[in-house]
Image (tube, coloured by chain):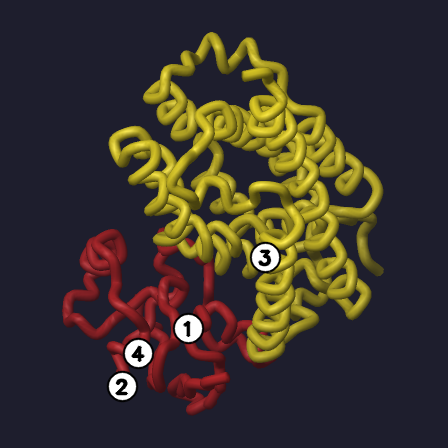
């Protein structure tokens, strides 16, 4: 089984997840609430993350996610909704905490 | 002191299986299903009929009718399952609700294909479903009343896994035997299963419903029981169509 590494800043917590695993699994891998998931369906914006490394490892955002990120003012192209991501390679993320 | 509220998915919501263990179990389950598929082709009469070049018209039509009825009846049971799932795991309930939303009206796709081969909606409604179709629906009610929602969700995992694996081959064959213009509904149904990763969606619900080793053993058993019930349906279908026609005097 291929495992990929997700590093979550600022705690620098490293989590290994099976390839293709949704990022919502992070909640069950550690007692810390590293990512503040809300609706888990891409509609509330609670889990916005900034992808520092491995943007392509999280899959392509669809049009709805892109539109919503733009609505949220995340226009730099390096943000994602964590609940819409699947880990397909190593990545480093930071939870956006300035909303 | 805790209040008296129960059945709302409170408490420790950490899954019994972590992500790696879940992926490992799913691979094991998929191997079981691959074996079940081999047994299916070996034991069910005319199991590969719709993958052949010459498709019996009555067999084809009746299978679409029963498929549409199965969707219509099981969506009632599967909606009841949502209530039971929500009591146990809100995470699983969210996934299940989304899956049901995507599948809920797919009977219409099969009715469209029926009309293409000359079976009207009136004829569909006048057709009494097979006993095996009713018994499958009854088994869902039994499960929800007496064993819980895991068995209902297991049925969907079996069907979705097998559909994604085998349906493209069947549809390619039907393009030749029935005509591509006549199977658009079935093609669209298959697109949903594949593009929305329905096996993955259902597994995400399964994973949250598995609470111990007994649940895992039960899940494996449910997959075998559902296959047995589906085999009874295909036998009834065969006897009522192809076998009956073979017995007709020339």
Q: Circle 3 sits on which residue? A: B37
Residue A69 visible somewhere in the drawing: yes
Q: Which mark is nearer the camera, 1 or 3? A: 3
Where does the C terminus of chain B fall, quadrant-wise?
top right
In the rendered structure, the residue with mark 2 lies on which chain?
A: A
On the image, which quarter does residue B177 sit in? top left
When the figure is inspected, residue B144 is found, relative to residue B199, above or below; the finding is above
Which disc, if any, is residue A57?
Answer: 4
* Sequence-wise first label, 1 or 4: 1
- The residue nearer to you, when weighing B104 against B68, is B68
**Colour chain B appears in:** yellow
Say which of marks 1 and 2 sits in front: 1
Question: Which secondary structure, mark 2?
Answer: strand
- Disc on the earlier residue, 1 or 2: 1
Residue B189 spot, x, y in % from top left: 39, 40
Along the viewing direction, whichever of B201 and A70 lies nearer the viewer: B201
Depth order, front residue of B230/B201: B230
Measure the C-alpha gap from mark 2 to mark 3. 42 Å
Residue B107 relative to residue B179: left or right? right
Cα distance in 3D space between marks 4 and 2 = 9 Å
How many neighbours does mark 1 have within 10 angstroms: few (below 14), some (14-19), or many (20 or more)? Answer: some
* Mark sitting on residue A53: 2
The residue drawn where x is 81% and y is 65% is B214
Instruction: From the image, state whether disc 2 or disc 3 is nearer to you.
Output: 3
* Residue A20, disc: 1
User: x, y (%) of residue B135?
Assistant: 73, 31
User: What number of labels is visible?
Assistant: 4
The alpha-carbon separation of the residues under discs 1 and 3 comes to 26 Å
């Amino acid at each position: 089984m291929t495992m990929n590494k997700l590093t979550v800043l600022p705690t620098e917590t490293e989590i290994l997840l099976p390839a293709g695993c949704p990022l919502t699994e992070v909640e069950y891998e550690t007692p810390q609430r590293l990512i503040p998931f809300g609706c888990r369906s891409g509609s509330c914006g609670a889990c916005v993350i900034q992808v520092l490394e491995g943007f392509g490892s999280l899959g392509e955002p669809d049009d709805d996610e892109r539109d919503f990120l733009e609505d949220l003012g995340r226009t730099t192209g390096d943000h994602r909704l964590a609940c819409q991501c699947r880990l397909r390679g190593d990545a480093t993320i930071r939870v956006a905490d300035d909303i | 002191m805790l209040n008296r509220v129960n059945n709302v998915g409170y408490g420790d919501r950490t899954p019994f299986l972590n992500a790696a263990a879940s992926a490992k179990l799913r691979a094991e389950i998929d191997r079981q299903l691959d074996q079940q598929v081999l047994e299916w082709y070996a034991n069910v009469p005319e199991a590969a009929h719709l993958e052949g070049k010459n498709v019996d018209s009555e067999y084809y039509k009746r299978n679409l009718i029963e498929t549409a009825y199965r969707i219509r009846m099981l969506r009632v049971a599967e909606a009841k399952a949502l209530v039971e799932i929500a009591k146990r795991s809100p995470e699983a309930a969210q996934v299940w609700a989304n899956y049901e939303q995507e599948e809920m009206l797919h009977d219409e796709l099969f009715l469209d294909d029926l009309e293409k081969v000359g079976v009207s909606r009136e004829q569909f409604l006048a057709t009494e479903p097979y006993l095996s179709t009713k018994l499958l629906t009854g088994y869902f009610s039994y499960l929800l009343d007496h064993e819980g929602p895991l068995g209902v969700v297991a049925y969907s995992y079996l069907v979705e896994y097998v559909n994604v694996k085998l349906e493209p081959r069947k549809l390619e064959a039907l393009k030749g035997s029935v005509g591509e213009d006549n199977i658009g509904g079935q093609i669209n149904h298959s697109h949903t299963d594949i593009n929305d990763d329905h096996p993955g969606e259902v597994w995400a619900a399964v994973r949250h419903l598995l609470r111990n080793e007994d649940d895992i053993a039960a899940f494996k058993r449910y997959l075998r029981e559902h296959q047995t019930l589906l085999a009874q349906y295909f036998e009834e279908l065969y006897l009522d169509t192809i076998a009956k026609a073979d017995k007709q005097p020339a």
